[in-house]
Every structure is written in C-alpha cells, then in structure tokens.
Amino acid sequence: MSRKRKELPIVENFEITGVAAEGKSLGRWNDLVTFVPFGAPGDVVDLRITRKKHNFAEGTIVRMVRPSHLRVEPLCRHFGVCGGCKWQHLPYSYQLQCKQQQVVDALERIAKVEIPAINPILGSEHTEHYRNKLEFTFSNKSWLTAEQLASGQEFTDRNAAGFHIPGSFDKVLNIEHCHLQDEVSNELRLFIRQYVARQGYTFYDIRQNTGFMRMTMTRTASTGEVMQVLVFGEDNRPAIDDVMGAVAQRFPSLTSLMYVVNTKVNDSLADQQFVLFSGRDYIEEEMEGLRFRIGPKSFYQTNSRQAYELYKVARRMAHLTGEELVYDLYTGTGTIANFVARQCRQVIGIEYVPEAIDDARLNSRVNGIENTLFYAGDMKDVLTDDFVAQHGRPDVMIVDPPRAGMHEDVVHVILNAEPSRIVYVSCNPATQARDIAMLDEKYRVEEIQPVDMFPHTHHVENVVALTLK
C-alpha cells in the first residue's frame, strides 16, 4: 500500500523578493528559497506550496494580497497559462535591468576573471511582433483553463491550435491571439484551424499519434515576405490539396506556401521532405544591402531587427581592417560570416548541419561574395590543429555556439591557434562564462555587450570581446 502524500500548506502573506532562473520569481518560506511563476518583486501573496525539497520549494499564487508597484498589465490574454512571455507583467525597463544583472552574475560567479565595466544592455526597439518564426501545434485535446473548469460548462469541442502547456506534452492551449509575430501569423493560424474543423478533418492526437492536421510554421521577414508551412499527420492527398488550395486562395500574397507529411512519433522536421505548393521555396531577409535566403529548415536569428544590432556589435568588436583572416565558428547559415566578409580578407565558416552550410554558400553566391569558405561537420572534429595549419592561423575568431557552449577540445584548439581577437556571441551567459574561464589562460576580457533579443522572456544574448594577453 502506497504511503499517503503529505498535504502541502498554503502560506499567507508570502513576500516575493526577487527574480530567478527560467523567468520565475522567488522568496523565502521556512528558510527555504521558494520559486514562484508569474510573480513580481514586491508582491505579497497567498502561496500554495506545490513542491518541497530539503533545500528549496516551489509554489503557485492563489491570491494577490498586495501587488508590487512594479506590476504592469500583461498585454496577452493568455498570460499565466501559456508557457511563453513570462515577464509580460514586468516593465520592459525592469526586464532589461534583470537581464543585465544575469550577465554580471554569470561572469562574476562562474568565469571569476577580471572584467571591465559591462556596457548597458541594448534593448529591443520592438517588444511586440518581433519574432520571425513561430510554430503552432494542432491537437484534439485542448488544455482547459482553471476558469473554464470552474464554469461547470461542458466543452465538447476540444480541437486546438496553439502552444504546448509546460509539463503536459499532450495538451495544447488554444491561442486566439499571439503578440509575438506579425498579425498575418494570427490570421493564417485562425483561418487554417477554422477551415480544417469546418471540413471535418481530424486534429492530431498527440498520445495516439493519429490525426490529419498536425502543425503549422509561419516565417516572416523584415522585407515583408511570408512563408507558411503546414504539417500533416496523414498522407491524405485529396485533403492536403483541399486545405493547401484554400490557404493559397485566402492568402494570395504569400511568398512561399509549403507542406510536410510527418507520420513519425516526434515533431522534428529536419529530416522531412518539404513540398512546395505555390510561390518559391524561400523568403529573403535584408541587411545593409545583403540578401539572405531563408528556407523552411534554415536557422536565422528569430528577432530580425535586433539580429542586425547584434551583428553590428560583433563586427565592431572584431576590429576589422580588411586584412584579417576570420574564422566564424558555429556559422549556421553564414549570416555573420557574410555580414563581415566585406571588411576582411577571408572568412572560414564551420557548422555542424550540412543543410545550413548549403545555405551559407548560397547566400555568398547570391550576394556576390567570393572570400568565404564553409565546412560542415562536428566542430571538435573539423576544427583541429591540422585544420588551422592547413587554412592559416586566424587573426580573429567569431564564435556563436549553441546554449551548451563550446566543447573543451574546441577551446584547446582556439588556445593553440592564438587568434589576436575572439568575439564570443552567446545565448547563454552561464556557459559563456565557463568557456571564458578556460580561455583566461591566454586571453583577457576587453568588452562586454548584452543584447536583448527576446522581450518579455528571461533570455539574453551577450557578446564578449577577448584579446590575446
């Protein structure tokens, strides 16, 4: 017979004192650091403890006793249920302060190296409609909110198109309006959802892995071009042609309309075949007269306007004169490599994903750039001492690794290559700080510039310039 779980208490007049990782807030209960979603420093709340460990606790707000003076009205009707945009209730100026402090804490507590004063964070000019890519999941098991459950109403239509609920892989919150992307994204999603339902096509059952309508992906560009991809869970050609034709007729200005038939258990599309229904199979972004082609599988910074600011920071920190050999590690589709190519002698880009390297080479050709070379493969296998000996010692290295940071073997090759300057672009200040600690053997930190790419979230990008000691 299983042991009955001890009921956890409701803590009255709990004070939230700060912000924490993953967009949460925190306070103390019984000398335990207690993490709370959707709280603001200065809130006094009644808190239901949901989890208690020996060194921390977690809870949810059940009643607002006295709201913080920091609180602002969230702009989205789905705030507090949807898993994204967890800081909508905080002023943007305060969000920037928290992100700046996140960078400071990582460098001081993890890197533990001498650092200069950190530049003020570059905020995003646009805090709404800033994303250029969103994916929505279709499900026949919509998430019912606390208000819906409390209403006593019976909900027979559980079809949804929206975002997964955190911690519930098979439940999807039906999104009526999302503020993250251009309004055309909402128009497309709502039309597709309504049309599929009206035609009687099934929405995907995530647990059973059955159903016709599975996902959509919308990509927009600062040039005004739009790509719409529909993902079907069944290879029903008449139904696919019907839905695709309806979308094409309703949205004739789409630059690209494509679809995928994915009958796998998982949602990943990297290994799937994309079929062009109308238009062309890419959209284009533009920076300083450079055109970047973006296909359905391409990686591109999801805040187009702020990506330009980020790349300008990286280029400025590189101190290019036109004579340098630059290595661009984790080059992706070669955006940074092509962006700096005009200011240096040659750029060599390395990236794990072969399709991304194809895009990088294509973007060089489209823009008439002839001083780039790109190589595909695992960074620790491609970037070796022999590779450096063959291609030349770099004057500058620009590195933009994934959240996990750089492999230790890669750091050792960089130390052996001894470029005069390193520009380290990171979406995770913690792993960036860890790597800077390893680079401290030969490099000192010269400049630090945080950049906010994702308003209303806890995520922050950081650029660090390092010079050879």
Image: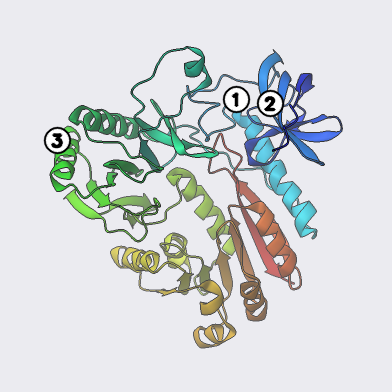
SS at mark 1 in the image = loop
Residue type at numbered disc 3: Gln
Label 3–label 1 contact, CB within 8 A? no
Q: How many marks?
A: 3
* Disc 3 crowd, CA 10 A, few/some/many (<14, 14-19, 20+): few
Q: Looking at this view, is 71 or 161 the one in front?
A: 161
Disc 2/disc 1 C-alpha distance (Å): 8 Å
Residue type at numbered disc 2: Ala
Q: Looking at this view, is 369 or 44 the one in front?
A: 44
Any part of residue 280 in sight: no
SS at mark 3 in the image = helix
Residue 98 falls left or right of residue 338: right
Residue at the spot x=23%, y=33% of the render?
A: 196
Residue 115 badge: none
Residue 249 badge: 3
Any part of residue 157 in sight: yes
Residue at the spot x=56%, y=19% of the render?
A: 73
Q: Quadrant of residue 101?
A: top right
Residue type at numbered disc 1: His
Residue wearing tag 1: 89
User: Where does the image place residue 379, in percent across and percent down from the top left?
Assistant: 53, 72
Q: Against 176, is 63 above or below?
A: above
User: Where does the image place residue 271, in percent across and percent down from the top left?
Assistant: 35, 61
Residue 285 falls left or right of residue 467: left
User: Where does the image place residue 444, in percent across and percent down from the top left?
Assistant: 74, 65
Question: For the C terminus, which image quadrant?
Answer: bottom right
Residue at the spot x=39%, y=64% of the render?
A: 356
| Earlier residue among tags 3 and 1 | 1
User: Where does the image place residue 127, in percent across and percent down from the top left?
Assistant: 50, 33
Residue wearing tag 2: 40
* Disc 2 crowd, CA 10 A, few/some/many (<14, 14-19, 20+): many
